[in-house]
Amino acid sequence: MFITALKLKNWRNFRQAELKLARVSYLIGPNASGKSNILDVFRFLRDVCKPDGGGLQKAVKDRGGITKLRCLHHRRDPEVRIELRLSDTIDGDSERWRYVLAFKTEGKGAQRIVVTSEQVWRDDEQILDRPGSDDSRDPMLLTETHLEQTLANREFRSLVDVFSDVTYLHLVPQLLKYGEHIGGHRLEDDPFGQGFLERLAKTPKKTRDSRLNRIQAALAVAVPQFKALRFENDEMGHPHLEALYEHHRPNAGWQGEEHFSDGTLRLLGMLWSLLDGNGLLLLEEPELSLHQAVVEQIPSLIDRVQRGRKVRRQVLISTHSQALLSNPGIDPAGIAILEPSREGSKVRSVNLSEAAGLDAGLSAADVVLPQTRPKGVEQLGLW
Ligand SMILES: Nc1ncnc2c1ncn2[C@@H]1O[C@H](COP(=O)(O)OP(=O)(O)OP(=O)(O)O)[C@@H](O)[C@H]1O
Ligand SMILES: [Mg+2]
């Protein structure tokens, strides 16, 4: 299933926002325009659905409470609202589901969050409409969504599965390389890839080997002199990735991940994530640490590495990269442009003149990226 559209009210720096999603979509906008905030909507829904220790109250609390979540530009309306459309096919012709969740604070001392609306449509039939009669009999029920209650979501379990399958990746190579030395706290869901090696270790050997083979082939093209990749457990039983390089002495042996370059690790993490899991993959600035020539290929790589998979992941990318957006294969339907204003950011898709430019063979980097340049940015060098 694909998420084909998102509509927000009062979510962080968006008073209102609507965007359409393609198989691979791109969030483009200046710093602090809300790209990560959009990605967080999907992480939020995943957190609400978590079977152990999830739920609406915790998902809001983990984000600093509703006062941090609700749009500061929209003081009079206390309600946050998220609406999603989902479909079996990405072109949206066969719409199947619509999910709406709205919530606000109870307004009393306890400051609990209450659901003000939760609705589900399957094909054109509404199958959930809250608050309902049960909720009026027992208002405590409104402190939970039906997403987090197995008994209550029997009829729309497939939505819960879609939200639960969301993965977010913003791999920080240093955390992976020096994880053992840094030790300590690891964030839930491991957004920064600290537990990447453990995830590899938990994958059945056959699957792991076949994925690493594919990744090895991609790395051999992207990383000069790179020859081979393997997974090993050391004598302490700790998992490691090892690489072989052509420029080393013939018996120089394999190098452990602490010697991998940052870009190699980020590329590896991205490719693994594309092959691991079936749901929406949120990629935060995949261009980081990579050579422009490699970045240019990211949109093609996303397709290529998943070729032959039964389910190809839907991907949502935040990016600033000219190189990435210069790839001619980018689907204009998946481009969302974020434009900050005094009343919060606005989101739009490509307009007619931009579409004409793209049709004429220009790239998103030529047509769209310049629109996101902060006004007067040249002053930065003079300041
Ligand atoms: N509740 C809120 N109301 C209004 N603005 C908010 C709220 N929560 C966060 N913001 C604003 O959102 C901005 C951060 O957005 P975000 O991190 O999504 O930007 P971004 O586009 O990912 O930027 P970058 O390219 O630097 O990563 C900050 O300026 C912050 O003040
Ligand atoms: Mg960001």
Image (tube, rainbow, N blue to C red):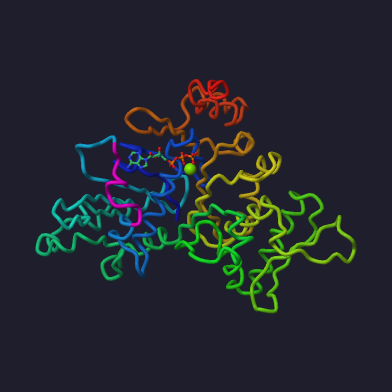
Name the residue furthest left: 137
Could you tell me which residue is drawn at 61 percent across and 50 percent down? 302
In what quadrant of the picture does the N terminus appear? bottom left
Residue 286 covered by magenta stretch = no
Could you tell me which residue is drawn at 70 percent across and 60 percent down? 214
Examine the rendered structure and indicate whether residue 21 appears above or below residue 96. above
- x, y percent for residue 262: 66, 52
Using residue 78 as the reference point, say whether residue 355 is left or right of it: right
Q: Quadrant of residue 177?
A: bottom right
Using residue 242 as the reference point, say whether residue 199 is left or right of it: left
In-front residue for pair 130/145: 145
Residue 63 covered by magenta stretch = yes
Could you tell me which residue is drawn at 53 percent across and 22 percent down? 383
- x, y percent for residue 142: 19, 59
Q: What type of secondary structure mainly makes up the magenta span?
A: loop
In-front residue for pair 173/163: 173
- x, y percent for residue 266: 63, 53
Number of marks drawn: 0
Using residue 299 as the reference point, say whether residue 235 is left or right of it: right
Q: Quadrant of residue 74?
A: top left
- x, y percent for residue 380: 54, 24
Name the residue furthest right: 250
Residue interval drawn in magenta: 62-72
Examine the rendered structure and indicate whether residue 122 appears above or below residue 322. below
